[in-house]
Every structure is written in C-alpha cells, then in structure tokens.
Image: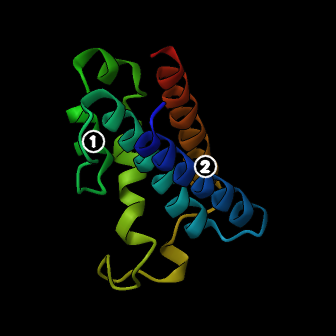
Amino acid sequence: MNEPERRWLYMANEDLRTAELTWREGIYAQTCFHAQQCAEKALKALLVAQTGHAAPRTHFIVELLQLLPAKLQQEVPADLAPVLDTYYVATRYPDAIVGSLPEALPGRKDACQALELARAVLLYVKEQLHQR
C-alpha cells in the first residue's frame, strides 16, 4: 500500500472512530455524517490504488462507485450509496432540507444502519487493498 492510499485509509478509520463515539453519546446525525465520511474516504483510498491518480473531488458515494471497475461496483452493497449520500449535507446544515428540524434528523435506527454500511465498506476496501 502506498502513502496516498494509507493516508485516505487513516482518515476513513478516524471517521469510523468518530462515528462510533457519537453513536455511544446518542448524537445520531453526526454518527451518520461520519459514517458517510468513512465510506467516502475508504472508496477514495481504493480509487487512488486502482488509478494511481489523486482522489476525485466529490463527496458523493454514488459518483465514487461509478469510477470503480465494473467488477468492484458489483461487490459493493447496492443500497450503500443512496443511504449514506443523504447524510452528507442534511446532517451538516439546518437549512439543507426545507423545513428540517432536529426532529427530522436521523435517529438511532438510521445511525445503526449507517455504521453498519461504513464498517462494511471499510472492511471491503481493506480486503481489496491487501489483495494487491
């Protein structure tokens, strides 16, 4: 594993740790945001490894998945991108969704699902990088 991949993976691990900390504290919107960030950065590590180029300048997992080889796209959980991508903006800004209030933010169930997805993506990426 080269240095750029290692740095992206380090940041992905940090986001997962942050997601787990906020989960334990019941701060579910931030759990969802950091889970999304974990998956995003893990996929960027994989893309850097696959292409040898700098990571793409996007925060959307849907776009990152489209840049992976078709075989790898099929191996990533299909429900991953839409679920996690909804958390990127909506959990960061109170006016991101018209009429959003704290009651409309992700709850425990959402955070649990986001954490599971982030862990699965990070594990998948680590497995792919160690197979190289």
- Coordinates of residue 110 in the picture (x, y in percent): 56, 54
Give amino acid for label 2: Asn
Which residue is labeled 1 in the image? 64
Instruction: State left or right for residue 33 relative to residue 18.
Output: left
Q: Circle 2 sits in a helix, a strand or a loop, which is it?
A: helix
Residue drawn at 60 percent across, 39 percent down:
119
Please state the total of marks drawn on the protein image. Answer: 2
Q: Is residue 92 above or below residue 111?
A: below
* Label 1 residue SS: helix
Give the numbered dot on residue 86.
none
Give residue 17's position: percent from left, percent from top.
Answer: 68, 55
Q: Residue at x 29, y 52 (%)?
A: 60
Determine whether 113 is above or below 104 in the image. Answer: above
Closest to the observer, 31 or 99: 31
Residue at the spot x=71%, y=61% of the render? 23
Q: Quadrant of residue 122?
A: top right
Left or right, residue 63 beside residue 38: left
Residue at numbered disc 2: 13
